[in-house]
Image: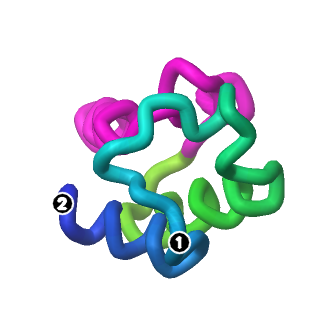
């Protein structure tokens, strides 16, 4: 699952080191359009719903946070 999530992120932002960055949102590495595109692609790929309340730095600042958000949605 992590490999697919990483590929989705890299398809949107190929120059970002998702596995090592720790402040993707806080350091404005990802722009708002990038975030929306990644979230939309994750919803399509994993057949999950990500609410606007989930689009927060705590979930999207790190690759691990993104993976955890997808895991939690799959378990719900």
**Magenta stretch mostly in which secondary structure?**
helix
- For the point 64% across and 25% down, which residue is it? 56
What residue occupies the far top of the structure in this picture? 58
Q: Residue at left 33%, top 62%? A: 5
Q: Nearer the viewer, residue 42 or 74?
A: 42
Residue in the picture at 53% in, 35% down: 60
Q: For mark 1, what is the residue?
A: 15
Q: Position of residue 40 (x, y in %)?
A: 63, 63
Tag of residue 1: 2
The answer to whether residue 25 is above or below residue 44 is: above
Mark nearer the N terminus (1 vs 2):
2
The foreground one among 8 and 47 is 8
Q: Position of residue 48 (x, y in %)?
A: 45, 52
6 inside magenta stretch: no
Nearer to us: label 1 or label 2: 1
Q: Quadrant of residue 63 in the image?
A: top left
Q: Quadrant of the C terminus?
A: top left
Q: Which residues are magenta?
A: 50-76
Viewed as shown, does residue 25 lie left or right of 44? right
Instruction: Give the image location of residue 57, x and y in percent.
Output: 61, 24
- Residue at 30 percent of width and 36 percent of height: 64
Neighbor class of circle 1 (other Cα within 10 Å; few <14, some 14-19, many 20+) is: few
Looking at the figure, which quarter contains the N terminus? Answer: bottom left
Q: Is residue 31 above or below residue 25?
A: below
| Residue count near mark 2 (Cα–Cα under 10 Å), binned few <14, some 14–19, many ≥20 | few
């Amino acid at each position: 699952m992590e490999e697919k999530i990483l590929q989705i992120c890299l398809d949107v932002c190929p120059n970002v080191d998702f596995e090592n960055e720790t402040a993707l949102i806080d350091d404005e590495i990802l722009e708002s359009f990038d975030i929306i595109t990644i979230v939309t692609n994750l919803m399509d790929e994993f057949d999950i719903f990500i609410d606007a309340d989930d689009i927060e730095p705590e979930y999207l600042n790190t690759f691990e946070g993104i993976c955890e958000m997808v895991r939690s949605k799959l378990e719900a």
